Amino acid sequence: MRIERELMRGAGPVAILKLLDAKERYGYELVSSLEKIGKGALAMGQSTLYPMIYNLEAKGLVKSKWKEGESGKQRKYYSLTKDGKQKLATDTQQWAAVTTAMREIGVIARSCKLGVC
Amino acid sequence: MLIKKELQATQLPEEIQKLIRRIARRTRLRRSEQLDVARELVSHFEDALASGESTSAVITAYGNEKTAAKLLRSACKRKRWWVELAFVKSMKFAAVMFGCFLVVYMVLVLLALQRKPNIAVDYVAKLNETAAAVPEDERAWPLYRAASIVLNENNEPSPEVDGRPVYPTWVGDAGWEEYAVWLDVHQETLPLILQGTKKQGMGFIVGGKISEEDKELWPDAYEKSQTNFSDHMINVLYPQLVHLRRMARLLRFDAIEAAAQGDGSRCFQDLEALLRLATHTREHSTLINDLVSLSIYRMTFQTIGLIVERTPEVLSPEISALRQHLSDLDEELKVRFDGERLYILDLLQRTFTDDGNGDGVLVPGKLLEAMSLSHDATGQVNPQPTASFLLAPIGDVLIASRKELLDHHDDFLALMYEVRDDPLYAWGDELSEYSSQLVVRTAKRYLNKYYPVDLLIPALDSALLQSKYAAANRDGLLATLFAIEQHQASGKWPLDLAEAGVVDPWNDEPWKITIVNEQPVIYSVGNDGDDDGGRHVFGAMEWHGIPTSIPDGDWVVWPNPE
């Protein structure tokens, strides 16, 4: 299931922040992780992902550095900054509140999980 | 080139390399930023291909390259240093503001271009009113013109003795022979001048053009004025003044020769003619006319003083008449400012619009044109900068309005009229202060909103001083003639000059007389204001702005100590 652009504009950055909370990642790793973990729901155009990361970087939520990966290949790795962690915490609470509210209203069924009800 | 090299070093297929190059180029970011984006895309596509995807699938999965480039550009720009972003924003803001200003300015220029001056009054005609009112057969100028043409052919000599110029003051002095010849040559010129001085007025019409009648007298100026003619009052020519002075010099030397020859009648006639010539010179109410007139008056006073000193008997029968004539000159010895005001009024009507209530705004280019004319004594209208009209809105801000300028000028004239009748001893600091301010304002040029008027304000305080000196000369002469008359009547010199009818301009008390070696010495206490017993000192008659420069001594008027 593909998420509408407006919804994705709000969800995308939070998802990226969450993925980077666990460990630092490079661009393509983020792309494939979003596809796999979200089972396609959070998959976004690759052309959109990089600008989104750059924007997070411009806001000081994410920082980047070129370094050699395990394969010996040079990649740009992204990680969360202190501000990024705070932002993730705030956004997580807000998303939880929204999800709870949506569930209470009945937009989301109690048994629904990742878009499957 | 760097990106191309970087890509060639990779194992990426040609299609992907080209895609990365296109995206990087389309971002229109800086070289270093494009390189960074390209490197990340290389890494991305290598990882994608390594995951087993085909080239076409990888390209498709990436998405629209145009959108990608656009998003990358805006995202990368956001990543720039905040100072740089602030600077760019400021520059953009400044550029927009400048653009708006430019548009508004050009609208103002276009509006200014619609302005037109309203030349409603012929101020040159106003200046000529007195001269034009003189009946044709009562005009002295045709006679003066004829005399001037002859004088042009044989002008005043410049005698020298041992290669040095000499200035004879009396018959028999070194160099007098040449003056005797000069007077002899002009035996037919003098009657023309004498006849002219008996006329009601001079009747010379001034303007920017030399008339046909005067072509013979001023052929060069006539030719020039035919082509470079401007009807601005600034360009009014006064070529007659130099000739009036020349005629005065001829009369002076003829009066001296007549006195030396004992011809009192001829001498008195010449002196009376000199006084009339000075009056004719004042026919136009401009400062330059008044100053030339004053110089002729002072020359006459000095000549009379000299004659009564050297040949006291020659003018004996005429002393009373001379005293009367000299006493009547009070108004003639005052400088007037009417003509100067006409100049300003003409300047304003030619350079400003007319709202019908005496106010208006600058007409583009006209002020520069007028300024150019005022700087060019030839009267030639110099070409103006082609884009001078672009300065119109700036001129509106920097230059006062028509009414403000006239009020400013009138304030100045009011002050001049206020101090015009002050005696020399009361000549005050107020005027000096005003003159200093005027000099400072004029030096500021276009940062002074009264600049156009200030520039045209002549040194009226100096002119006023000149008129006061002339009046002082006249009063000293009147005191002298009174003493001579008393001596002729009683055989004794008077003990004081309280009955002379004039007062010392330096203390408002009667002029002083003292007897030295049985000869009278008539004097003023001078600038220092105290009586030094008739001890003459150079400069005692003049006003000194700095108190320490005032000389200690008196100003002896007769006999002439200098």
Image (spheres, coloured by chain):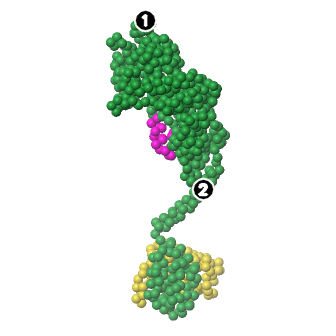
Chain colours: A yellow, B green
- Specify the quadrant that holds the C terminus of chain B: top left
**Chain of the residue where label 2 is placed in the rendered structure:** B
Assess disc 2: are there few (<14), some (14-19) or many (≥20) residues with their C-alpha within 10 Å of its C-alpha: some
Give the residue at x 54% y 37%: B218
Note whether B498 is above or below B157 in the view shown. Answer: above
Note whether B9 is above or below B290 in the view shown. Answer: below
Quarter of the image where one finds residue B98: bottom right
Residue B450 magenta-drawn?
yes
> Of marks 2 and 1, which one's residue comes earlier in the chain?
2
Secondary element under disc 2, as helix, strand or loop, is helix
Dot label at residue B106: 2
**Residues in magenta?**
B435-455
Q: What separation in Å lies between label 2 and label 1 (alpha carbons)?
A: 85 Å
Give the residue at x 55% y 42%: B224
Amino acid type for the residue under numbered disc 2: Met
Q: Nearer the viewer, mark 2 or mark 1?
A: 1
Dot label at residue B490: 1
Residue B159 in percent (x, y) is at: 39, 30
Residue B222 in percent (x, y) is at: 56, 39
Relative to B97, is A82 on the left or the right? left
Viewer-closest of B224 and B358 = B224
